Amino acid sequence: MNATKALGLPSLSADLERIEPLLMASVRTGDGFLDDVTTHLIAAGGKRLRPLLALVSATGGTRAATEEELLGGVAVELVHLASLYHDDVIDEATVRRNVESVNSRFGNLVAIVAGDYLLARSAAIAAGLGTEIAALLATTLGHLCQGQVAEVRSSFQINRTEDDYFTAIAGKTAALMSASCRIGALTGGTDRPEVEALTAYGRALGMVFQLRDDVMDVVASDDELGKPAGQDLAEGIYTLPVLFALRDPVTGPELRTLLGQPLAQPERDKARAIVSASSGITETMAVARRHVAEAVTASDRVGSRAVAAGLARLAESLLEGLPS
């Protein structure tokens, strides 16, 4: 997925390049060790989808972003990076973005504290952008924590409900994408109806993005993911494809005998194969397409036709190349 290409607004590429040095500068402390930790995943690259959403919501791709607009993108990316530091500790992950994870390289305690530092830097930047943005980011952090708790609470529960799954991903993923669009729109001085439309778009896009990730965890390779495939299954995070597969009368009984406990590699591979062969992928893709439709509807309320079309293409592009 190339989000900038999908949007079709070439000027955004230059602004994304301007984000990179700001990201690095925002977390450097002058302490060599801490700087190595805080810049580890920034240096590894990434899609920068959240700052991209902030930038397109701020400028519409029609002009160069102001410093405030760029800093809005930095603030949301720092929150995302912090969540990755913390998630990898929870998951005991060893690889992230095709490099050694922070917790694996520096230890859990350092990873947790460094993640907290990234959140602190994000909060400081948001405070400089005004009380509304600072309050929005604080609320978003609360949603992220609620989503994470909902996920951890249901780990290894083969009777996890779909409602619990959607509550978790709305907090863990959709809330920050929604906030990214809203912060961009606010820093760009967008009128209120369009702020609300972009906020709704970000929320729907976040749901699609997580559903896509959960399908990919089952059907993609380690190299495609930049981390071990089937990690959610192994760690007891039963996503929507798995929940649908458990409900499938053909695949459910065998899958239930495997799940409910940590999985070694052979059992992980077997579970992935069962979910792939079930109705779970098809049913999850149908849910994802409904959220794509929500995103497209929200994008239609954006004033610029070029931006609206680009946002619609971005939502649709998230499902390209996945099983139908």
Image (spheres, rainbow, N blue to C red):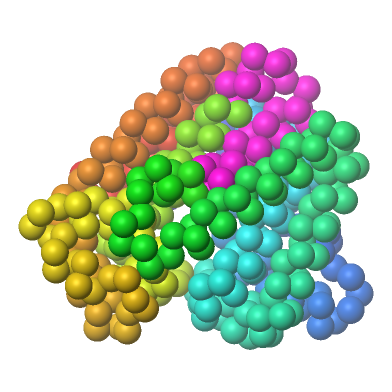
Q: Does any portion of residue 190 appear in the rendered image?
A: yes
The residue under the point 69% across, 54% down is 79
In the image, the segment drawn in magenta is: 170-198
The residue under the point 16% across, 60% down is 252
Q: Nearer the viewer, residue 285 or 242?
A: 242
Q: Nearer the viewer, residue 141 or 159?
A: 159
Vertical arrangement, residue 8 with respect to residue 28, above or below: above
Vertical arrangement, residue 252 with respect to residue 279, above or below: below
Q: Is residue 173 magenta?
A: yes
Vertical arrangement, residue 204 with respect to residue 25, above or below: above
Residue 258 position in % (x across, y down)? 23, 74
Vertical arrangement, residue 281 with respect to residue 197, above or below: below
Residue 141 position in % (x across, y down)? 69, 49
Q: Is residue 228 magenta?
A: no
Predominant secondary structure, magenta span: helix
Residue 115: quarter of image: bottom right
Residue 92 position in % (x across, y down)? 53, 78
Residue 246 position in % (x across, y down)? 21, 57
The residue under the point 36% across, 55% down is 160
The residue under the point 68% across, 43% down is 140
Q: Nearer the viewer, residue 257 or 213?
A: 257
Instruction: Work out which residue is located at the far left of the displayed protein and give it.
Output: 250
